[in-house]
Amino acid sequence: MSPAPHKIVVTQRFFDDRSHAFLRAHGCEVEQVPLPPGKGDGDLDFETLCHLLDGAAGWIVGHARVTRALLEALPGLRVIARRGVGYDRVDVAAARELGRVVTIAAGGNDDAVADHTIGLMIAVARRFRESQLAMLAGDWSILNGHDLCERTVGLVGLGRIGKSVVRRLSGFDAKVLVHTRNPDPDYAAATGVEYVDLPELLRRSDFVSLHAPLTPATRFMINAPALAAMKKEAFLINTARGGLVDDAALLTALRTGHLGGAGLDVFVSEGDASFAPVSEALLALPQVVATPHAGASSHEGLARTNLVAARSVVAILNGLTPPPGTVVADGR
């Protein structure tokens, strides 16, 4: 008699047929939660999540908060797989203490987010939004922008996505400055990046792009003094996490003309509703190009992250080795 299939609940949209088939082929029964238009799993309340995840051994999750209370209410939930690389919404200490495993989709969305980062750099520097808004108003005057080619780009953080951005910037002959806790001299020798402290990076960069995790130490690392230290008319790009930037201070810097513009994929208001008016004000500025935390959401990027998450779940439930770099909490 064959063992009962593992119940896997997916609370993310765009979970593709290949990843569904992979889970089913490895003894899993997949339940994908239908989400209302414009809503994500981060909008599901505690009671709803408990109901949906009842009896589940694995959960492929997007932006829902994975709290100690939720884990305690779901003793059969063995693995929580983030379809993404951030895990600041997961109580990893509680997961570890309660014997669960938390994984991320390491390597799955690097290219998608790096492409998005470069796209935002070009879009904001060449004033794409400003130009289109003017044209819609009947003004077809040419707005002069700035090149990315041969400019100085400062990267705050140098993980997988940051390194993917470095590879792309090589095609623009950009000078790349990097601020990281773990400088690698061999990597610098191979790529030509220059390691600097944060104040020097802010002072010298024409573009500042964030690729750091959100932690208590990095929250609001780009605050009013940091923004004031940047070049006048420099551009700030954030495709990492809302909360790395004090969005209220950014709004002031943009309104006063200190910065040339911003390319934003993430906002403080994603985790703090009190910042919603600030986000709305940023979105209204013509020199801001914004997307709704969509950096990883290409068809190809989602397919890659889906499959990494599916492979992680199958490996954990079957006592096998998950893909490299995926496990961030292991309570087994």
Image (spheres, helix red, strand yellow):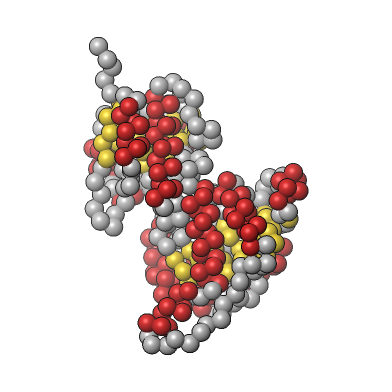
Q: Is residue 49 left or right of residue 331?
A: left
Residue 313 against residue 254 in the figure, above or below? above
Q: Residue 129: image x %, image y %?
A: 45, 74
Q: Is residue 252 visible?
A: no
Q: Residue 5: image x %, image y %?
A: 28, 23
Q: Residue at x 56, y 49 (%)?
A: 161
- Residue 125 falls in image quadrant: bottom right
* Of the pair 182 and 268, the residue shown nearer to us: 182
Residue 330 against residue 222 in the figure, above or below? above
Q: Residue 89: image x %, image y %?
A: 43, 46
Q: Residue at x 26, y 42 (%)?
A: 33
- Residue 147 falls in image quadrant: bottom right
Residue 141 against residue 171 in the figure, above or below? below
Count all numbered tags in the image, as a single digit: 0
Q: Is residue 179 visible?
A: yes
* Of the pair 173 and 215, the residue shown nearer to us: 173
* Of the pair 88 and 136, the residue shown nearer to us: 136
- Quadrant where the N terminus is found in the figure: top left
Q: Residue at x 25, y 49 (%)?
A: 35
* Of the pair 168 and 291, the residue shown nearer to us: 168
Q: Residue 271: image x %, image y %?
A: 41, 55
Residue found at the very far top of the displayed protein: 1
Q: Is residue 133 left or right of residue 45?
A: right
Q: Residue at x 28, y 17 (%)?
A: 3
Residue found at the very far front of the displayed protein: 171
